[in-house]
Image (cartoon, helix red, strand yellow):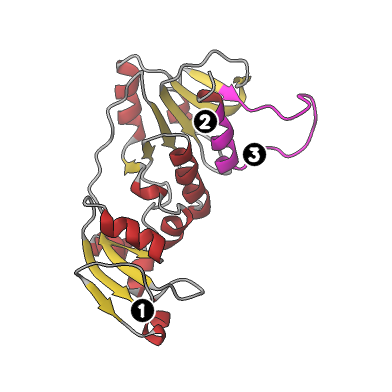
Amino acid sequence: MRSLADKQARTTHGLFVAEGDKLVGEIASDGRYSIARLFVTEGSKVSHPRAEVVTAKEMERLTMLKSAPRSLALVAIPERRLPTPSEKELILCLDEVQDPGNLGTIIRTADWYGVRHIVCSPTTADCWSPKVVQATMGALLRVEVSYGNLDEWLGAVAARGVEIYATTLDGEDIHTAPITAGGVVVMGNEGRGVSPQVLSMVSQRLFIPPFPANRRGSESLNVAIATAIALENFRNI
């Protein structure tokens, strides 16, 4: 159980940890997920044939959280394929977003704005890590996160004539730039931004300006906050 805090162990066993009645309950009622083990304490609202009752003391030893939940599940990591890009669908693409907290917030934000797919570079944080799973508050069950070679995938996107956008510091004002309802929006690494190779495939660069526009302040926005602002603009054209 403890080993699943490590990505290599999750990959080896093909399992991730979900904790708390709300999240575990959603997984238990969702036919797409296979539960390997499910532990509950007295008072848990989760009902499942695989449920094993444990004491509060035992749950304290099992949990990765500061406060022991009433339920904890070991769940099989689903196989995900890279989505087929479309002019009608908005897809989020993450290029080396490495902070688990940022990734969790981005997934939750994507769910709020109706984004169904997020494509990540192999070096992006693992969406099945305990911290990310908890941060998504169940959004990970509704947003399909997949990992793959961005060069190849974005090349296929461009070949289909689908617009590829990226947020950069030298782009056009996102509030006034001509953007489409569908396409791919690339968000880059917390410190370096979008990598040069990925940037070379972008059809339009977008900039989120400060207020007022000529004001000097922070060098850049947190990537999760920038993602929320970008999606707000794409959903209001």
Could you tell me if the residues under marks 3 and 1 are in contact, i.e. CB atoms within 8 Å?
no
User: Seen in the image, is 218 located left or right of residue 170?
Assistant: right
Residue where numbered disc 3 is placed = 221
- The reply to whether residue 95 is in sight is no
Residue at x-position 63% and y-position 20%:
173
Kind of element beneath mark 2: helix
In the image, taking residue 118 as reference, residue 160 lies left or right, namely left
Q: Which residue is mark 1?
A: 41
From the viewer's perspective, is residue 88 above or below residue 83?
Answer: above
Q: Residue at x 25, y 77 (%)?
A: 52
Three-letter code, disc 2: Leu
| Visible residue check, residue 47 | yes
Residue range of the region highlighted in magenta in the rendering: 206-232
Inter-mark Cα distance, 3 to 2: 14 Å
* Mark 1 residue crowding within 10 angstroms, few (<14) / some (14–19) / many (20+): many
Give the CA separation, mark 3 to mark 1. 42 Å
| Amino acid beneath label 1 | Thr
Q: Residue 231 — which label?
A: 2
Q: Earlier in the sequence, mark 3 or mark 1?
A: 1
Question: Is disc 3 placed on a helix, strand or loop?
Answer: loop
Q: Please rate how many residues cluster around mark 2, counting C-alpha atoms within 10 Å: few if below 14, some from 14 to 19, many from 20.
A: some
Q: Are marks 3 and 2 in contact (CB under 8 Å)?
A: no
The mark nearer the N terminus, 1 or 2, is 1
Q: Quadrant of residue 56?
A: bottom left
Q: Residue 128's quadrant in the figure?
A: bottom left
Element assignment for label 1: loop
167 up-or-down from 18: above or below? above
x then y, percent, for residue 157: 33, 22
Task: Choose between 44 and 236: the one closer to the eye.
Answer: 44
Front disc: 3 or 1: 1
Q: Residue 49 location, x and y as percent?
A: 19, 69
